[in-house]
Amino acid sequence: MFWQTSRFRLDLSRPRVMGIVNITPDSFSDGGHFASTRAALAHCEQLVGQGADILDLGAESTRPGSPPVPLEEERARLIPVLREALTLGVPVSVDTYKAEVMREVLDLGADIVNDIWALRQPGAADAVAAHGSCGVCLMHMHGEPQTMQLAPMDGDAVPQVRGFLRGVTEALHARGVARERIAWDPGVGFGKMPVQNFSLLARQHELLADGYPLLVGWSRKSSLGAVTGLPVSERLVPSVAAAVLAVERGARIVRVHDVAPTVAALKVWVAARPGAGTPD
Ligand code: 9MG
């Protein structure tokens, strides 16, 4: 299985690690955008050095209740980091839902659009369709970031997530976007209760049946806190455990903060695959 992106055709026969790069103003410095650009770039280089296969740049927090970032501010944070990140030799994804930002980053050479709104914001599907080859990650979200945890979804999450992802995918195919450009993401934590998030992991095979590569993001999420009692600063082990479980159950890409330990854990998974090490 492959994921077609603007510059790279990613071979998904081994699990891939997408490293999270948050580009937010540096609260410890009055250096403004320059300081946060330098910090984000240093972080990109560090994650690539640790084995990240993809970088995911984001300038707006998606944590429940986070305020939206205005377009110009998002551009000012993202663009300088993107220009440099594109030289690091790995696919660069941009986490945005704004069509204007998508068009600009794709023109600059970004490889993947990672959209928590699954291209439902005005112009977003057009921006991706107009580009001939970028990858796109379609994520399920119930509600919207400002209010999603106040009114989480009801009932069995698995068929709802699958039905939603099928719908947005069909709409994208109708616009001419090829199958191998698309990855699916169940959207762990986005308007879902812990029991629903864990059912998406327990029954992940049901989401795989449509044949799209699955990208999942469990890293440091509150459902891990709900079952372990650990604060966000102590969720490394649960995050790595969830990433390995997701891969064991068929996910091809894991979106993580802690790249080095996830890469190490997945090396063990690769070495222990049935057939690994069998003499020719
Ligand atoms: C931006 N963002 C935050 N959490 C995420 C997740 O689980 N998946 C994807 N694709 N993006 C996410």
Image (cartoon, rainbow, N blue to C red):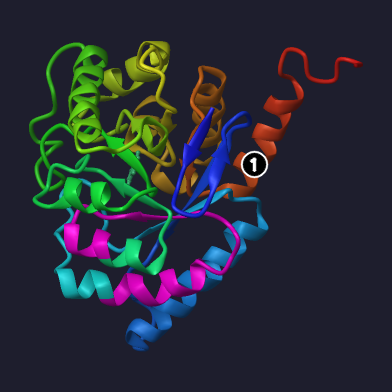
Q: Is residue 280 magenta?
A: no
Magenta extent: 76-103
Q: Is residue 82 magenta?
A: yes
| Outermost residue, right side | 279
* Residue 62 shows in the view: no
Q: Residue, x 57% and y 19% (percent of image)?
A: 248
* Residue 71 shows in the view: yes
Mark 1 burial class by Cα count in 10 Å: few <14, some 14-19, many 20+: many
Q: Residue, x 43% and y 54% (percent of image)?
A: 111
Quadrant of the image occupied by residue 17: top right
Residue 106, x across and y down, in percent: 34, 61
The verdict on label 1 being within 8 Å of ligand 1 is no
The mark total stands at 1
Q: Is residue 41 left or right of residue 29?
A: right
Location of residue 149 with respect to 103 vertically, above or below: above
Q: Residue, x 17% and y 49% (percent of image)?
A: 126
Label 1: which secondary element: helix
Point out the image quarter for the N terminus.
top right
Q: Is residue 203 left or right of residue 271?
A: left
Name the kind of residue labelled 1 in the image: Val
Q: Which quadrant of the frame does ligand 1 lie within? A: top left
Residue 101, x across and y down, in percent: 23, 64
In the image, 138 versus 221, the foreground residue is 138
Residue 277, x across and y down, in percent: 85, 20
Residue 94, x across and y down, in percent: 36, 56
Q: Which residue is mark 1?
A: 263
Quadrant of the image occupied by residue 170: top left
Location of residue 11 with respect to 35 vertically, above or below: above
Location of residue 3 with respect to 156 vertically, above or below: below
Point out the image quarter for the C terminus.
top right
In the image, 257 versus 121, the foreground residue is 121
